[in-house]
Image (cartoon, rainbow, N blue to C red):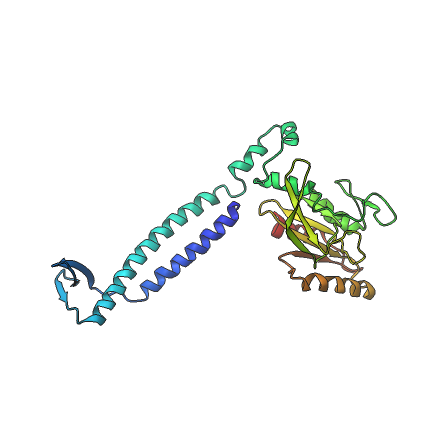
Amino acid sequence: MNKTEIIKILKETASMLDSIVDTVNNSHLPDEHLNIKNLRGKPAFFCRTKDGKQVYVKQSESEHIRYLSSKHYDRKLKAAAEKEKRQIDRCIGILLTDLDSSDVDKVSDNLPEVVRENAILSELTSEGYARKWQEGNSVVKKRRTHKKDDYHKYKTLRGDYVGSKSEEIIADRLFARGVPYHYEIAFTPEATVNKSKPVYDDCGIITGYETLGFSPEAEDTLHPDFYVLNKRTMKAYYWEHLGRMDDPAYCLKNFNRFMRILDSGYIIGEDLLVTHEDSKHPLMTERIDEIIDKYLI
């Protein structure tokens, strides 16, 4: 769990505590306070009034006892909620002062480059997780090799070959902004991960799981343009670019693709990022950066 997620949970908790305090404040606490004394081995209820007088409350005054008991609880609850809220506010303040990095992530950042490149970084750190994600063959089950061919003509800054100038621009912006990505991975949205069958790498580390109903060579296997990772949150997204929105046949083909993905439970903006263009409205670099800033940084 990273700092942003921790702050989110703390803020949600703080909001809940604020609601408790507001509810108690709106309940009109009385000027009377409940005191309980032990008389001859039995609890006796006394009501201390605003002027400090102690008034005995008879056992027969059950409604008054319940009322005073509830208000006694409300006072204790409010005090505890206010104390906890102050503690949470201090924690949030500390975390916000250094939100963009953590001590464990700084270890790899401060290593000499030659050491950082050769070290096996901990997968519990953002950089280590991103490296494992980028190298993981359990993710990249490709049908194509993406060398230069009749379709993949555009070379990216990272050295990939992609199928359009717009895809090249997206890939180059991801690379320039330090966002890990895979291009055209094999993807079957209806497939189910089988957690009972892990896939191991050469070091015996689990890199993924077998997927039921998945074959990278199958005709109905999809190949989303990009699979991208937010290193900070460790959340991955599929990114589809629709490049010929003024072509009816192209739109129909991609509509059917999108329906498969959405019907399998994927949600645009949560699991799937989408850009589009047509001959009169080209893809703007500013739009790519907006998506990167919102979802991937």
Quadrant of the rendered image containing residue 272: bottom right
Residue 156 location (% of width, % of height):
77, 43
In the image, farthest residue toward the front: 196
Q: Is residue 177 above or below residue 64?
A: above
Name the side, left or right, on which 112 lies relative to 87.
Answer: right
Residue 86 versus residue 204 in the image, above or below: below
Residue 160 in view here:
yes
Work out which residue is located at the far right of the displayed protein and give it.
150
Q: Residue at x 53, y 45 (%)?
A: 2
Count of all numbered marks drawn on residues in the image: 0
**Residue 46 relative to residue 19: left or right:** left
Q: Position of residue 119 (x, y in %)?
A: 63, 31
Residue at 36% x, 50% y is 86
Residue at the spot 72% in from the left edge and 50% down from the top edge: 226
Identify which residue, 80 or 36, lies in the foreground. Answer: 36
Asked whether the viewer can see residue 178, the reply is no
Q: Nearer the viewer, residue 193 or 109?
A: 193
Q: Which percent across, then down, holds residue 240?
A: 72, 55
Image coordinates of residue 204 in percent, x first then y, are: 65, 37
Quarter assignment of residue 221: bottom right
Tell me the quarter of the picture where residue 219 sits: bottom right
144 sits to left or right of 90: right
Judge left or right: residue 270 versus residue 44.
right
- Residue in the image at 86% along x and 46% along y: 149
